[in-house]
Image (cartoon, grey):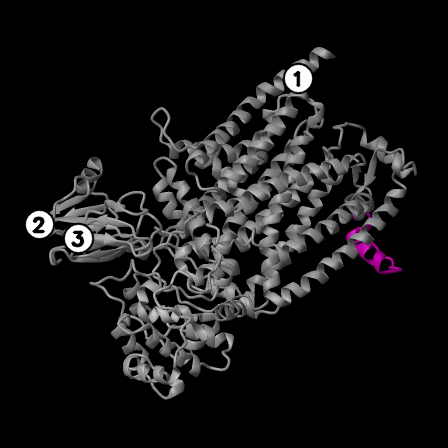
Amino acid sequence: MREFKILVVLFAIVGFTYYGIEPYAHHIMHPEPVEADFNFKDLKDIDSSLKGDAQNGKTLVEANCVACHSIESQGHMPLMDDATNAASYGVVPPDLSTAGNLYNKNYLANFIANPAKAMHLEHKYSETKPFPMPSYNWMTPKEIMDIVAYFESIKAKELTHKESFENACGRCHSMAYAGISAKTPGKVATSHFGSTPPDLSQYIKSRGEHYLHSFINDPQNLLKGTAMPRVGLTQETQEDVIAFMEETGDRKKDERNALGIWVILFFVLMSGLAIAWKREIWKDLH
Amino acid sequence: MINESRRGFVGKAFGAVAGVGAVASLVAMKKTWDPLPSVMAAGFTVVDVSNMEENKLNIVVWRGKPIFVLKYSADMKPTEGRNVKIGDNYFSVMIGLCTHLGCIPAYREDKKDFKCACHGGKYTDAGVQTFGPPPRPLDIPPFDLDGTTLTLGKDGAAYKELMAKA
Amino acid sequence: MAEFNKAENLGEWFDQRLNTKAFWKTMMSEYWIPKDINFLWAMGALLATLFGILLISGIFLLMYYKPDVNLAFDSVNYTIMQEVGYGWLFRHIHAVGASIVFLVIYIHMFTGIYYGSYKKGREMIWISGMIIFMTFSAEGFSGYMLPWGQMSYWAAYVITEIFGGIPFIGGDLVVWIRGNFYVSDATLTRFFMLHVLLLPLGILGAIVFHFYTLRFPHVNNQEGDFFDYEVESKKFLDGNKKESKVINFWPGFLSKDIMVINIFMIFFFYLVFYHYNFAMDPINFDKANGLKTPEHIYPEWYFLWSYEVLRGWFFSIAGISGKDLGLMAFAFANGIFLVMPWLDRSPTVAPANRRPYFKIWFWLLMLDLVILTIFGKLPPTGSNAWVGFFASASFLILFISLPFITNMEAKKAGGKQ
């Protein structure tokens, strides 16, 4: 009975201290991640419920976009190599073959109309330092939706987790543990953004899935003033991206979770035997 | 008897010499822990400011940290306790790490201020914070002045004078 | 050389050469431990086990770890964690083990304080134990630097910076310890040496010494009872095991230890596999960057109380700066436990619950340490700074007042008799 009382006191002290230095301290030090909004409800300039015409969209894209953007799946190859591209624009412009896969429709439509606003980067770009891609707000909402419909029509059937990551993040971020280096050279990115976009190999560990889920959806929520844009990923793509980060940064997770149970069971068995053995020895002693 | 004390003496002599040896080896061990000569030499960065352009930020590395050296043009006003006069011009000499979270602020020549890209902190050309989260002005590294040569890492007269005013 | 008869069996063969039977008796089967004990008496054996686990897991980590600022981070987080077979397991065991070993050290230490196991002939047990604790602290600190993450770097930076407060030599001392003006490759390689060789050797030696110090004063018991070991052990050997106040180390004492150890391992491996973030701070999965300070810097949990004693003094008193006051308080906090046997002026060896004043002192100390630990992690802003100050001051007051409290208690007890 006395031992039981000691154990309760011990648990109370250790438990209370643990609560203070882990859950409570983290709650105080780190902002609570905001619920992700995959509809991008704040963007209302373009009514994305309009039905677009992919055929007209194709014409518009070929007239307006391919001067800077490649669409490799449709035969529009990049006009310059990545380094030259990066030097000209600050960041390598994205290939648009997978735009229909990656971006939320509402986001994409509003992005075309006003990129800096959609990305939540209006504090970074201004009249004097404009975003490399001009706003297409002179187009009618219908025309913009035509473009969106075109991207939707050419989207890839399926993207692997790695392809999602490369297309959504790989223009700025490296992932050394997966052998991926950013398309935009670090120096160029640094001068464009003001700081170097970090390598993401261990971000699944350092930030955790919960944080990433909120952060990728809108970086400004958790890191006010950051140069990282809101990318506008669909929920599905974002989950693929995070899955890829986990496959790269924590690839032994399944092995760990599977093995743990057996080790614990082993010690449960050992404890049972140890208790029986101790009783046997102490039978003579008590 | 003679033998006894003789043995006592030899024993003590042996002990004393062994002790000297042990202390000597401690000196060698302490030396092994000393910073290498190359490290010590790299601890003092010498900068010649005579050819610097006005209103252009120079960044030198000192002890693993970026150091800002900014030469003032005639229209820029010095701040008490922040600037040092070298020749005819005032200079800002500061550790180029934002006092908020240690990012490296960028100098904007047109606005004559520093802006930190990470969280939007701003500083005057003398490194005094004017906006955003930075809690204090940019730190000033110890330096010594000899003509137009700055030696970072030595606290010379000009540095002490500056610190006294700040 | 004496005549050797041909040995009948392997046991005899060794006995002839190494006197194993007598050795076994002295060390195990006739080494006497009091019977009146509870599971807290198993913490010593548990600590020895955990040290063994740390040593073994450390050896395997050493096979792929690279002590170089450019390679260290990836050698841990890529090579060991993701490539080496079960490398991740050894790292998790090592990290969680290092954190949990301090929990058990603290339990062991405060058990000793609670039951008064540091006085009346047991002073050397206490002192040797504190030496192990101090060496372990250095071991923990040096090991935390090796993965070369952001927290590794900045904890090393902040803690080495503390030495800068020592008068006259401080500035040079910091540079000397680091081997550079800032935490750098030279710092990493020398702390690596300390962590994998010098300190473990010291710990091993200190553990052996600690065991040795137990032999003559004997292990304390739940009631602080002093009895004649000769008489009690004779009872035991004569077969009156139930009446005897002692048990043998093997198998009596160790059977209980082994039971506790096995039950503890269930909890330990639960932490290793499923709940390890407390020992492997997420921030440390960002590579060290001397140009970017993390938003919050804090040491591992087991240093938080003394870190808070240091940090609590944030304003100057009587012309002495807060930084210097903190440093003095920090030095006091880290040295004071060592002289515990002389601070407790009461000759009574009894559990705290039977000591009217010491009881209150003990639980106040526990409360203060818990508060210091929790606030040592929280940002020191606003009211937190004041809580830190009062908790830090309370710590000093508690220890300064201990001799007076125990003196009063001794007088009171003396009056009764």
Quarter occupied by the N terminus of chain A: top right
Circle 2 chain: B
Left of C248 or right of it: where is C286?
left
Q: Residue at x 38, y 35 (%)?
A: C323
Question: Whole-Å distance between the Cαs marked 3 and 2?
Answer: 11 Å
Label 2 and label 1: CA atoms lie apart by 78 Å
Q: Nearer the viewer, residue C401 or B76?
A: B76
The picture places residue C181, in percent across and down from the top left corner, at 34, 50
Rendered position, C311 above or below C179: above
Residue at point 25% right, 54% down? B115
For the residues beneath circles 3 and 1, the answer to whether they share a chain is: no
For the residues labelled 3 and 1, the Cα–Cα distance comes to 72 Å
- Circle 2 residue: B75
CB under 8 Å between callouts 3 and 1? no
Residue A261, image x, y percentages: 70, 61
Of circles 3 and 1, which is in front?
Answer: 3
Could you tell me how many numbered marks the image carries?
3
Query: Pointers 3 and 2 in contact (CB under 8 A)?
Result: no
Q: Foreground residue, A16 or B41?
A: A16
Do the residues marked 3 and 2 share a common chain?
yes
The span shown in magenta is: C1-23
Report in which chain the residue with disc 1 lies.
C
Does mark 1 fall on the same chain as mark 2?
A: no
**Residue at horizontal 45%, vertical 48%?**
C155
Residue C320 lies, in percent from the top left, at: 36, 28
Which residue bears the numbered disc 3?
B112
Q: Residues within 10 Å of mark 3 (few under 14, many from 20)?
A: some
Amino acid under disc 2 = Asp
- Say which mark, if any, is on residue C410: 1
Chain bearing tag 3 is: B
Magenta span includes C4? yes
